[in-house]
Image: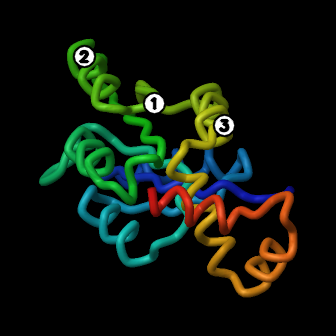
Amino acid sequence: MDTQFHVLAVDDSIIDRKLIERLLKTSSYQVTVVDSGSKALEFLEVREVGVNLIITDYSMPEMTGYDLLRKIKGSSYLKDIPVIIMSSENVPSRINRCLEEGAEEFFLKPVQQSDVNRIKPHLMREKPNSLKRKAMVECISTDKTRKYSNNNNNNLCSIFLQNICE
């Protein structure tokens, strides 16, 4: 499987955005960069694309990375997307608060290749809702529906429908 993971990077600093984008692309991730939390939410809502991970700066005007994290984890549709917070400030109470609210990691800036290497395990974990979403997408696809409806051993459509009807 040569699926490329899609990372949404959010930072108000153009220098930090370029750095994180370069590091992620070097590691063969598909990268979308935006400069604010509100643009990140717009991207996630409008595109309905398969973003596999969000990495966001903590300190941004209007909406902090912490605010963005809370909105994502409070959304039934987005809550399973792993979120990593990054900051140039090493404030233990801030780090703990972000991790308690559901952030997978907290990176200190400048982000380095060793930090990016810690992302992959978060992408490889399938969470329950993402499995249901995957089954739903496969059921909606005409070719997949025929494939699974003819295969009694692996009927994802039936499993999916059974799960959402319970």
Q: Which residue is mark 2?
A: 91
Q: Residue at x 64, y 63 (%)?
A: 135
Q: Position of residue 98 (x, y in %)?
A: 29, 28
Closer to the eye: label 2 or 3: 3
* Residue placed most toward the observer, 6 or 77: 77
- The mark that comes first in sequence, 3 or 1, is 1
Q: Is residue 52 left or right of residue 89?
A: right
Query: Where does the C terminus fall, quadrant-wise?
Result: bottom left
- The mark that comes first in sequence, 2 or 1, is 2
Crowding near the residue tagged with mark 2, few <14, some 14–19, many ≥20 C-alpha atoms within 10 Å = few
Q: Position of residue 115 (x, y in %)?
A: 57, 28
- Amino acid bearing label 3: Lys
Q: Which residue is mark 1?
A: 104
Q: Residue at x 66, y 74 (%)?
A: 139
Q: Residues under labels 3 and 1: Cα distance?
A: 11 Å
Q: Position of residue 26 (x, y in %)?
A: 71, 48
- The mark that comes first in sequence, 2 or 3, is 2
Q: Which residue is mark 3?
A: 120
SS under mark 1: loop
Q: Do the residues bearing badges 2 and 3 touch, measured as CB atoms within 8 Å?
A: no
Q: Residue at x 43, y 41 (%)?
A: 83
Q: Quadrant of residue 27?
A: top right
